[in-house]
Structures are given as C-alpha cells and as structure tokens.
Image (cartoon, coloured by chain):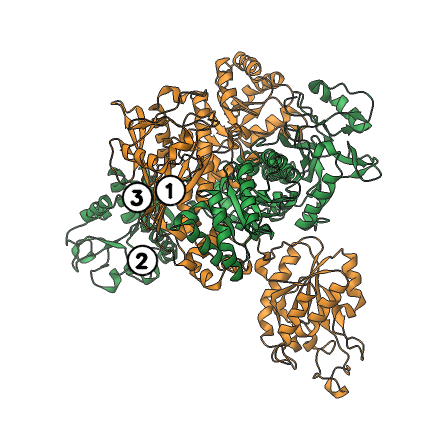
Chain colours: A green, B orange
Amino acid sequence: MAIATSLQCGDALVIVDVQNDFLDPGPVPVPQGADILPVLADYAARFERHGLPVYAVRDWHPARHASFLPRGGSWPEHCVRFTAGADCPSELELPPCTVTISIGEGTDELRVSAFANPHFEASLRTRGVRRLFVGGLAVDDGICETVRDARSRGFEVFFLRDALRVREREAGDGDRAEAEMIRLGAVPLTALDLSQRAPSSGALLTDLFEIGMLQAYFAAGMTDTAVFEFAVRRMPAGRNVLIACGLEPVLQFLEELHFTDWELDWLERTRRFAPGFLASLRGLRFTGDVDALPEGTPCFPHEPLLRVTAPIAQAQLVETRVTNLLHYCTLIASKAVRCVAAAEGRMLVDVGLRRAHGAEAAVLASRACYLAGFTATSDALAAQQFGLPSWGTMSRSFVEAHASEEAAFLAFVRAEPQRAVLLLNTHDARAAAHTVVRLAPAWSAAGVVLGGVRLDGGDLGPTSREVRAILDAGGLSSLRIFASDHLDEVVIGRLIRQGAPIDGFGLGTLLVTSADVPFLDCDYRLQRYAGRGCTPPAEGQGAWPGVKQVYRLRDSSGRMDCDVVARADESHEGEALLVPAMREGRRIGCGETLLALRQRVATELDRLPPRLRQVGDAEPYPVYLSERLHADCLEAGVFAGVGSGLTASPAPLRGETAGS
Amino acid sequence: MAIATSLQCGDALVIVDVQNDFLDPGPVPVPQGADILPVLADYAARFERHGLPVYAVRDWHPARHASFLPRGGSWPEHCVRFTAGADCPSELELPPCTVTISIGEGTDELRVSAFANPHFEASLRTRGVRRLFVGGLAVDDGICETVRDARSRGFEVFFLRDALRVREREAGDGDRAEAEMIRLGAVPLTALDLSQRAPSSGALLTDLFEIGMLQAYFAAGMTDTAVFEFAVRRMPAGRNVLIACGLEPVLQFLEELHFTDWELDWLERTRRFAPGFLASLRGLRFTGDVDALPEGTPCFPHEPLLRVTAPIAQAQLVETRVTNLLHYCTLIASKAVRCVAAAEGRMLVDVGLRRAHGAEAAVLASRACYLAGFTATSDALAAQQFGLPSWGTMSRSFVEAHASEEAAFLAFVRAEPQRAVLLLNTHDARAAAHTVVRLAPAWSAAGVVLGGVRLDGGDLGPTSREVRAILDAGGLSSLRIFASDHLDEVVIGRLIRQGAPIDGFGLGTLLVTSADVPFLDCDYRLQRYAGRGCTPPAEGQGAWPGVKQVYRLRDSSGRMDCDVVARADESHEGEALLVPAMREGRRIGCGETLLALRQRVATELDRLPPRLRQVGDAEPYPVYLSERLHADCLEAGVFAGVGSGLTASPAPLRGETAGS
C-alpha cells in the first residue's frame, strides 16, 4: 500500500545541511546535491502555504572544528560560520519564516543530528509538531542521525526520497542508511504522495480489481475483442419509463482515457502490478467501438443502452466509470421527466447542488434535468460547463443580514435591477407581498423589472393564493410566483391540482438524489469474447444473452407500440435504437446539441403510450424478444429463474417492476 | 448567457487567409496578425484530436489578378500561387488532414468568401459538417463574407474572437463586421468557451445566485462579519446517531478557494455582474474562522457541526459547497457505522464506485466508510487520494472471458499469487468450490496463497454454508468467504443471525447512495451579522437561534449521558464539541490522520448509550438546551412551530425523527 498523505497541522519540514560547501564545487560536495534544490523549494513553498513550520538545519562550525582534517577529523574545512560556504544556496528559496538550527557550534561538538541542538526539539514541541518531513544532504550523514533521534523522541518521520542525496563515502552507505531509517519506522515519501490534487486522467476512476484483471489478461495474452452491454435490469416501482442519458460524458471519458505518469507511479507503489504490465498501460487508449441509444431516448429494462466493442483490457477497464456515469445520468433524467410532466409547462429549475451527492452529481444532474425539459439550473459550474441557462433568487440569509426585509429587497433590486426574484417568506409572506406592492411603483419608475417572487416552504397552496391576490390587487399581476423547498413531482402535481397559482418550481434534494428511487438495478455485462458468446448467470438474474439490438415499432402517427430486443446479427422491422457513437476510439454520428437532445425527449415522450407519461404506476410498456433471441434465452435457461410463461415469438416479456 | 459548447461531430474549423503575405512584413499585413498563430494552432490541434475536419482557406491568385493595383484593383500584389507569400506560416502547425480551399484562382475572380469555391460547400456536406468555427485574417475581409454565405446556407457559425484580427482599412471596419456577423446569427466564442475541462478552482461550485448576493453585498458596502452554522434539522427514521464527517474536504476547499481568470471571464460573460464587483472577486480568499466537530464525532439534530465566521461575502459564497460536502460525508459515515455495527467485526469493503452518484461521491464515500470502520475500498482513486487499503476480487466477466471457470481461476491465481479472491458463483458455487479444493494443493505447492472466495448474490445463507463445508472438507478451512450483491446493514445482520459463515462483505449501491435515507434535512444558516442576531424563520422549522456551542456530558466511565446545546458566549459543564479548525483562513488544531478519526469513531460509538448502536430505531439520545438558549428560543417563538412541551431548563428537546 502506498502512503498518501496530506499536509496537516503538526507537520514540519526539516531541511538538513543544504549549504554551499556541500554542493559542487564546495570542499565536500554531495554528488548531484544541487538537483534537489528546486524540489526542496517546492516542498518549502507548500509548507509555507499551509502555514506550517520550515526548519533549516545547518553545520555552523568554528574555524578550528574538531571534524576538520587539521585537527585530526575526517573532513576538509567546511561550513565555517559566517562564511559563504555555510550559507544556504539562494536557489533553495527558503520562506521568510524558516527557523534555522545550527549544529556543531562548539569546537569539539561532533554530533550531526539536528537534535544535537536542544532548541530544535524545544521549538518542535512549542509549535505542536508531530510529523517531520526530512530532506537534504546527505542520507548517510546527518539525516539518518536526525531521523533516529526523532523516532526515539516519538515523532512520526517521513523522509523525502525525491529531496535527498547520498554521499556514499563507501559504496552502499546510502542503501544502508535508508534501510536503517525504514527499520526505525520512518516512511519514504515523494512529492507525488502529497499530490492529492494531481490532475486525474480518470484512469483511476475504477475499481482497482479491474486493473488486477487487466494484469491477468496481459499475463495470459488475452487481447481479443470483447463486447459488453450496459442495461437496466428492472424497472423500479415509481417509474414507467427510463430516459437514456450520460452518453456524452461517457464518450468524453473514453476519448481522454489514459494513464498519467503519476498514476502509473502510484500503481507501481501498490506493489500489486508487474513492471511489464504497467509498461503496457503507458500507451493505453480507448480504441474500441461504442453503439448506444441517443441521449434522451425513452427506454426500458433489458434494453442495452450502450454497447462497447473493444480489446478486452480496454472494455474491462472502463466498466466502472461507464456504469457510474450512465447509471446516475439515466437515473436523474428518468426522475426529471416526471417532474416536467407534473409541472404541465411551468418553469422548473434544478437547485440541487447543495444536497447532491458530491459536486459531480450536481453538475451531471443539471445537465440531465435540462435535457429532460427543465428551464434552468442554479448551479454555476453546470451553467458554465454545458451552457445551461441559469436562474436564482435570494436566500433567507440575505434578508436576515439586512436590518429589515425592505432594506434587503432594496439592496437586491439595486444589484439586480433586471431580474431580481424576491424571497417573500423569511418572516411573513403576506406582509412581504404587501411590501413589494408598496415599493413596486418606485422601482418601476427607476426602471427596475422584477423577475418575480419566491415562496420557500410553508404551506405553499394557501400562501401562493394569498400572495397572488395581494400582488394582483396591487397591480402586479404580471409578477410570477416561484416555489421551492422539498418539492418533487408528487407535490407539484398536488399543488397544481389544488389550483395553486405557482408559475415555477425550484427542485433540489428530492430530485438530484432521486430520493424515491436512489439507484437503478443495472449492469455492464460481457456478452461475447473472441467471437464466443457468454452464458448468462444461472442464478435467476434473467439477463438476456448475446449481443443485442433494440427495435422500436410505432404506429402510423409515430406513437410507440412496442419494442423488440433482437440479436444484433439479425434484422428486424422497426427502428434500430442502438446507433454508432464511436468507431476505433473516435466519435461519429453524435453531434447533437443539448437543445436537440431536449427536443428528442419532448418529442418521444409525446409518442409514448399516454399511461406511461403519468406520475402514478402504469401497466408496463411491452418489450418483446425476437424469435431468435427468445430461442437463445431458452437455450441458456434464462427464464428458469424468471419464471415467466413465455410462449410464441415475438414473446412478450414485460419490463418487470422492482419487487417482482 | 455565455455560450459554452464542446466540440462534436459535425463541427469543422475554418482558417481563413492565414498566409505569409497577410503577415508583417508582407505586402498587405493585418495588424498583429501573427498573434493569432499559436491560438489557431491550438484550435487546429483540438479539432484534429477530436477527428474533426480542418479547412484552410487561402487566396491563390494568378500573377495578374484583377484585385492587384496594376490591374486597377485596390491591393498590392499578394498571395500569388506557388510563391512563399501564398504559403501558410509554419507556426500555424496545420494538421496533416487539413483541407485547403483556394479562392480567387481565376484572373478575374474577385469574390473573397470561402464559398466562392464550390468544393468547400461540397466537402462540408459530404463530411456532415453543421457547425463552422471560423478564425483567421481578417474579420473585415474574407471572414465576414464567409460567415454571411455560411449562414445563408444554414450552417451554424461560431467566430473565434481570440483567433481573428481586423484590417481596419477604415476605422470601425472591424466593429461593423463583427456586428454584422452577430446580426447574421453567428456566435462569438473564445477558446475558453470550449474549455469545458478548464481546471476548476471550485469557486464556481456554487449556486450562481450566491454570487448575485455577493454583488448586492458589494454594492451596499456590506463587509461585516457573518456567522453561519451548519446543522442537521431532523433525525431521519432509520438512524439513531449521526457521524460528523466532511471537515477535511471543507477545509481544503476553503484553503484553495479563489477565482481563476477564466472563471471571472465566464462570470463577466453572463452579463449579470458589474466589472467593479468582478474585480473585487479577483483577490478573494477565505480569511475567516471555522469551528467544527472533529470528524468522527457522534452528533444529533440541532447540533451545529460547523460554524463559519467570516466577512459575509466569503461566508455566503461557500454556503453551497460546504453544505454539499458536509451533507454527503455525514450521510455516508452515518450509514456506514450501522454496517460496521451489523458486521460484528467482519471485514467490510466499500465497492460502491459504479453506482455512486458521480465520481466525487464515490471517493468521498470511500473515505467516510473507512473512517466509520470499513476495512478497505475497491476504489483506486480513493485508495490513492487518501491512502486507503484497497481490496478487490475478480468479476463474473473475467470468468466468462475464459474458456472455463477453471481456466479463469488459473489465470487469476497466476496473476495475483499472493491475494487472489476467486468468484465462485458465475455458474454454480458448489461446483466452483469443488474446483478450488481440487486445484488448491497444486497452487499451494507453487507458493500461491489464496485470499479467499467470493459469493456474489444468490441465496447467501445456504450457499455460504455449503461452500464452507466443501472448503473445510477439502482442507481449506483457513480460506475466507466474502459476500457481495445488494447488501446493507439489515441483510448483513440477518445473515449473521442465521449463522452464515461469511467472513467479509462488499457493500455497494445501498451504502453509497444511503438508499434507505438518501439525504439529510440540513442547512447552513446565518446566525449573526455585524454583531446582530438573526431571528429564526417563523414557519415552524424549529431552528434554534444564535451562535451556539454543544456540550457533551458523560458519566464517570466516559459513557455519553446527554448533550446540551448552549449559546457560544456562555460556558457550560461538559466537553465543548465545536473546536477551532481554522483561524483567519489557516488551519489549526486539526492534524488528525484518517486512522485517528477512525479510532475516534470506534471509541465514541462504544460510549454511546447501547440502544443507539443498534440497527433498529431507538429512543432518541437526549439533547437539551441550556437555560439561556432556551430563553432565546422562547423569545424567538421557536417552539410555537415545533409544538414541543418544553418546561424547565435544561429543557429536553429530543432529536426529532423524520415524519414527526
């Protein structure tokens, strides 16, 4: 297991004997000593940035020090105090706060450990230091001694492998010193181990065992083509249709997939992988094919959303991230279309960033919601990344930070004269509505165009009606009312049925966590390797075997009648839903803007059997098997586990609902 | 709204008239024309990388072209075909696949649009191009004409503002041409708009309206100190205790918070923000104080987990991300401790990456689970970032890719001789167990040390007993059995009560989505601004007002008796749980390793009243208010909404459960 650590309070950097006399052309140079100067400067800057102490330990000898040759010592004269040779080289760029610890100040003081100077330990204790990060010159001189003393005093010690050099007066001195330090419990480290934020290529966004399997494929020389399919296994209760989503981020991931040097370095240090195998990862790119349902396509369990055809190592490696992306994006798009249906054309904004599961979820959710028909997002990063319209209001804390609600409204309107949406129910929504009515004429005269008012929580039905009445009576009938706080498609539907005069809804937590259905039962399954089909598992998971295609059958008006899942190598009537998205690692045939995807969702949802568009559970959409796939299933014994009474072909097998 | 777009199929780069004669010291130089060469080279490399076409449009004149002065034209002789002046400068670094389109080849051909050459449109159509990205020299010459023709033919057009120059034969020509292009529907763009993957500083990980409020604070000159507290409002059904988690990522976020140039640039292009305000963001850093419960501390609703004290703009800006991090980390740590309790010491591995909500959720979940007591993670990136132990086995697809299960076992054991965990139930677990027994002696003789076997799904209770019996009978009683597939604390508890001989569990989906409780009702609330307390909302949210501290009272053995939430400015008996984590933007007093945090969780859970450690719902832990805070609550009318019958002080107010 490699050590990765981040700098924290209680850490200190200890730079040992980085002085001119120890560098070429000084009297006692350490080989390649100057190489570590920029590395140490980086470490020092890092500690400085974190407000952590930096110590520079130096030899600071009197002119006739006992270690010098003239006095019978073993060293030429060096690091005599107040000489240029005793100075730190300027390339070290020590931060101003560096504490200098002088060693060997007494004429006969021969100890080389930094702890020989009692001020060192005193300073460490005062400053609460618990972990020392030690670098400098040389491992086989002062450093090993310093580490020994530090360990014996209970400090944790990391020695900075990339910021150390060895003197090697005798061959092997360096190795012996390093082994001794490790024996003492000191831990070797490089700057990479501190690089928690090294830019990830995405290649480590995988289960480590995927890389383990790659190693086994490599060792066995297995390089043939594999075909994997991603599909949802079951329709969860509370959903009637799924919306395929996530292809674009998957393609981006595949296009950019590669291992960076530091990632390979880290893999090496896990000691799980052989060098030859790791070398094979160095040039790895995704060179395979992808076929997929276009984003925004309504789909159903058992229908592959995406097919990867690639050398098995590549296809296996990407399993985790492809699943991660398709699962979440499809989950949220499938939730969001329900909200769009419930809102019956009213404005919808996703405001879920704060309670989404991490930042990436929020950004992916904003995209999925927009695709599903949402109007805008509150999320700045998503707006930036995908060019989404953004929307937002003011928060309760903004009102509270002002002396009065009126003062807050004035300040906000002044700052956003063309779009301000005022939060009404920090204290009392009715009173706030009256305030808005009272102030509106002056604002209007000053050129202000209000964006609307917002009700955050409370009893939204009655409150919105009261506020609407107050605004209308005050001549503000064009002002829109937005509502937020723990909304979902069920609450929105109820409010609308109650006739609540709400023009737009902000949806957060329940939407971006898909709280009623927080996951889909889905997988990325090997269907074929080296031309040979894979038998689906025996234990009742009901997966349909083989490489497949989905055909959608429509009536003359375009309305969806049913889908047929067929073998990919047969042809069937209907529209083939899986289309090429990537060939040999390069995109093709995608090129759709988010607006186009959003249009597809709207169009295709219109073509669903109407019962499937409702929020309540409906009779499932019929998904059949083709005759040949049906035969393959029977041969593989798939339906033994499912217990479905299939008969003729195309044999109806309904999208099962969860719990069935 | 700024345009952000990503390159996609159907895009093409069109480089217009970037030729030596148009660059200084050519005969008809465009001012600063050479500046755009590296910019265009970057664009070209990007299109090349995406496999998208690049067109270079060039003047390619005969020697006596009608535009030349000698023939009565208005230009000096330039770009005569086959001369160096007509060449593209080498700094442009055109990719090999660039298609060259020559214009003005006929002696009297004066049109300057790229569409003057019919091969251009024919090539665009053949290659399915729909969007043109146009740059080069000069806007007020060929480019505007090309854009006009492109628009009239239905192409979408982006003009690359950072890769264009204007000739300005007459002052204002450039502006006029640009206005004309915009009128035609062409969209201005810079490389930044294509930089979806520009390294984010995290500053845009916020709701855009937070920045709107900052602008209002800025305009109003509001710079005083604000105090916000993050707390969970209600204990969800299915939880008895929460585990504070997420402080370390929050501190990292705060330490690194700043706006990069491209982020400010993007904000500017939203047209929501005034230049003076954006300038004030340029140097923004978090310089405030943070007090927090140490990570791993058991906690309860109404108890602030974290307090931010900072100038209001900073404290407001960080609301979204601080909430995002604390919410999810606490959610998962609180779920994970239940799994640890249920597992009664057995090994637990989080394997949730593939179905976590995005990548960040997975990485944060791995950390939270380890902190809660998990043994290891499957997630490579989390293992790298936090130095977590990693663990993994083989997948069903690995077995299926081999000709037989036995071949797969052999290949895997060969690749991982010291740790291989073999998946038994790809086909039939009992048969696979017999295979392992049969092969084990030879492996053992070859020095192989198996890590164990895994059962993925199926009926884990009976299957594990059968497999255990087979392994024991085969002399493999030391081989451990791991189980996975849709496990959570309830299933684990049931398996253990049934006596299933399972030594370790892999938990995925249900854990990392916290599927039974996918969110916590929590908020980050302003408690004080400029020394003035903020009144909590009237509408029944029951938030306790003011800046608070939590005191934990224990019996003589350390067992937790109760907590008292008090005003921060009073002292109270018991252990103060909120401790300083950051002062003036710098960390203090944290310095805890993940191991130490993990130890805290273990120790403190041991000190909980035993009923709270069980998986089933328990009588809530008592959280009282101090006398003074109680008085503040009454004054603020807090309990009117809650309906709690509070009496004397310390007044018991139990952590409510969701639904109450």
> Dots 3 and 1: beta carbons under 8 Å?
no
Earlier in the chain: of badge 3 and badge 2, it is 3
Q: Amino acid at mark 2?
A: Leu
* Location of residue A477 with respect to B164 vertically, above or below: above
Quickly name the residue at label 3. Answer: A10
Residue B593, x across and y down, in percent: 36, 37
Residue extending furthest toward the left: A107
Question: Which label is found at residue B535?
Answer: 1
Q: Which dot, 1 or 2, sits closer to the camera? A: 1
Q: Which dot, 3 or 1, sits closer to the camera? A: 1
Q: Chain of mark 2?
A: A
| Same subunit: marks 3 and 1 | no
* Location of residue A576 with respect to B153 vertically, above or below: above
Q: Is residue B635 left or right of residue A227?
A: left
Instruction: Categorize mark 2 by other alpha carbons within 10 Å: few (<14), some (14-19), many (20+).
Output: many
Residue A62, x across and y down, in percent: 17, 58
Q: Secondary structure at mark 1?
A: loop
Q: Amino acid at mark 1?
A: Thr
Question: Which label is found at residue A94?
Answer: 2
Can see residue B137? Answer: no
| Same subunit: marks 3 and 2 | yes
Please identify the quadrant where the C terminus of chain A is shown: top right
Estimate the spatial distance between the alpha carbons at disc 3 and disc 1, rounded to whole Å: 39 Å
| Same subunit: marks 1 and 2 | no
